[in-house]
Image (spheres, rainbow, N blue to C red):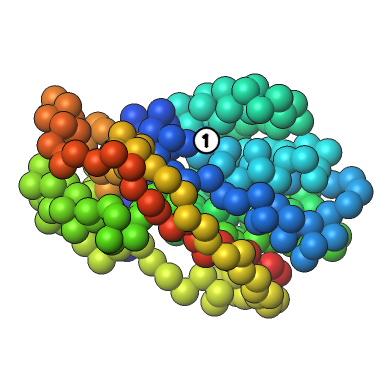
Amino acid sequence: MTEVWKWDPSLYSGSAAYYARGRSAYPPELAEAFVTELGLAGPGRLLDVGCGPGSLTLLLAGSFEEAVGLDADADMLAEAARLAGVAGIGNCRWVQRRAEELPAGLGRFRLVTFAQSFHWFDRARVAAAVRAMLAPGGACAHVHATTHEGVESSVPRAEITQLVRAYLGSTRRAGQGSLPGGTAGGETEIYRAAGFYGPRRFEVPGRVVTRTADEVVAGVFSLSSAAPHLFGDRRAAARNRRRPLAVTSTVDGPHQGLLS
């Protein structure tokens, strides 16, 4: 991954406005599972690394004195602040920094989360920094989820993939670079090398949600591989090349927390 792709600020350029609309929300049961697994009653702080528009930060904020969302994309943080205001959540702070800049003077945290974000970072460096930022008894949680795709029978995923390739080419795009082999795995070994033990795993079942055609399109533009800026002046044409859909059903999940 590192030989082919280097991070640049355009990774999710233009995607923030599509993210919350185009991706299924994490279910409330995920927050309940965190409370059960970690015993979150009482004081403590949350750090959500690579928080995007606050999808997980806002869900978990009620269990903490303060929730800090960290992201390199200013538009994502602006959307997170807007959504926090709409929801009436007042204990969040939004910090524009790359994960590689941690600890960045942010202090210690009872819980640090990576929700579909860890693969974008210098993982060994970030994991080591986060390990040193945990308060006594603190934990790091790695959340896997599928929040942007529907089941094949209801969402024409293969056709959408072909349409994106027709505009952007067959190699997966990511910012100004590409990821022909996709993002890297092997998270467990990286966490352990940084001094974590575990992981302890838990799973929250997925659920069926109803999406409109416009929401499905927004989900495509929420992806780094199909971010709006990649299409340039052809974005409107790509958006309008879709078959008519009244509603579509998508399966959201499963969601897993890996706790150490």
> Going 68% across and 67% down the picture, which residue do you hit?
259
Residue 81 or 103: which is nearer the viewer? 81
Image x and y of residue 86, in percent: 62, 23
Quarter residue 93 falls in = top right
Looking at the picture, which amino acid does disc 1 mark? Pro
In the depicted structure, whether residue 20 falls above or below residue 103: above
Residue 155 or 136: which is nearer the viewer? 155
Image x and y of residue 231, in percent: 17, 34
> Going 12% across and 30% down the picture, which residue do you hit?
237
Q: Quadrant of the N terminus?
A: bottom left
Q: Quadrant of the C terminus?
A: bottom right
> Going 56% across and 74% down the picture, which residue do you hit?
188
The answer to whether residue 33 is visible is yes
The answer to whether residue 194 is visible is no
Image x and y of residue 250, in percent: 40, 53
Seen in the image, is 153 located left or right of residue 242? Answer: right
Extreme residue in the left direction: 166
- Which residue position is annotated with label 1? 53
Count of residue discs: 1
> Going 89% across and 46% down the picture, which residue do you hit?
43
Image x and y of residue 209, in percent: 46, 49
